[in-house]
Image (cartoon, rainbow, N blue to C red):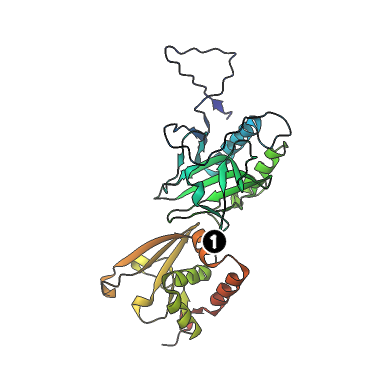
Amino acid sequence: MKKIIKIILVGTAMLTLTACQNHKKSAITKQTGVGKVQKTTNSNDDKGNRTFVSDSNASDSTWNSEKQDKLDDFLDDWATTMNQEYEKYDGDGQITTAAGEKFPRDFNRVYVNGQKASLSYDPSGKGNADYNVVAIYNYDKDEGASHITYFFAFHKNQPIVLVDETTNGDKVMAKETENRDLINGFNSIAAGQNIEKSSDSKSKSNDSSSVENPKLIGVFVGLLKDGDWFKDNLNNGHMYFSDDSGYGKTKGYDCITTGGDPQSYYWFKQDGNNITVKYNDHDHSPAEGIYKTEHYTIDRLKSDYYVNSGQKDEVNGYVDALKSLDDKDD
C-alpha cells in the first residue's frame, strides 16, 4: 500500500488548502500497516543538548533535509516489517521513553559501549560532540519501562546508529546497533546512495533478540549481588549453575547457587536486553516463598564488569569455573 502523508496547516483565523503548496509541516504521520514513524512536538519542554545549524541541501553535505526525508521513509518501511511503532523527535522540546528518559536533555547521562561520551542533537551532523545526532526514534514496548531508542549520528564524520534500551539507573547505556538493515540503510543515505536491504533482515533486525550465554549472566548476577561471596565459593568449587531447577515463581529461570541453602539461590531470566533477578527475601523464611525482584540490563552489567580485556578474561574464567548443579554431590 502506498504511503499517505497528510499535511495539516493550522492558521489563527482560517484553514487554507492549496493543491500546489509544498509546505514543511510541524506534525507528520507516515503510516503503512502497523509500522509508523511519527514526529513529536513538545515545544514547551526545556531544550536540552541541542545545536542548531542552518540546513543545507548541497549534495556533499553531511546531512540535510533531503537525506532526513529519505531516512524517515526508510524507518517507516522498516518499522512495518518489525511490527513496531516509532515516534520521531522533531527538534522541539524532548522525546520521552517508557523509562522516563528525555532526549536530548539526557544526552549528558549517555555511555556508549560502556564509555562516557558527549552527544548533541545537531541536524547538520557537523557539531563538536563525540556523537552528533541527526535523528532520534523511540519505540515503547507494551510492558513497563521497556523501549528501543535509536540515535542516528555522526562520529568522527562517519555515520553510526546507536541503540538505547536502558530501563533504570543513573546511566543511559547505549551501544552501536547490531542491526545490519539500519547500519546499511543509514550508511547509504548518508553517502547519497540507494538503500540495500540484507536478505535476512527479519532474523537480525531486533536489537533485543540476541541471547547471551546464561552462565555469563549468572556470573554478572553473582558479582552484582555479592561479589566476595560469589568468588570465594567459586574458588572453593562450591558455586553451581542450573537452567532447570526453577518452579512456581521461578519456573523458567536460570540460577546460580551454592546448593542446599535456599537463601543461596539467585534466579535470573533474560528477555532481550533486560534481566529479571529474583532471590529469597531474607526477612522471611524460604518456606513463605517471598522473593525480591530486581531488573537490570545486559548493557549495564557489561559496563560494570565486561569492558576491557582484563575484565573479560577474568569473567570468562568465572564462567568456565561454574559447575552444573546436576554434578553436585549430595
Direction front: furthest residue? 128
Image height check: is 209 above or below 301?
above
Report the residue marked by disc 1: 211
Q: Is residue 306 above or below residue 227?
A: above
Left or right of residue 259: residue 51? right
Front residue of 290 and 32: 290
For this view, does 129 lie left or right of residue 164?
Answer: right
Report the residue at 54% width, 75% height from top: 319
Check disc 1 and report its element: helix, strand or loop: loop
Q: Is residue 155 visible?
A: yes
Amino acid type, label 1: Val
Asked if one can make out residue 84 in the rendered structure from this viewpoint, the answer is no
Q: Quadrant of the C terminus?
A: bottom left
Quarter of the figure that contains the N terminus: top right
On the picture, is 289 further left or further right than 235?
A: left
The percent position of residue 237, horizontal first and vertical second, equals 49, 85
Residue toward you, 102 or 181: 102
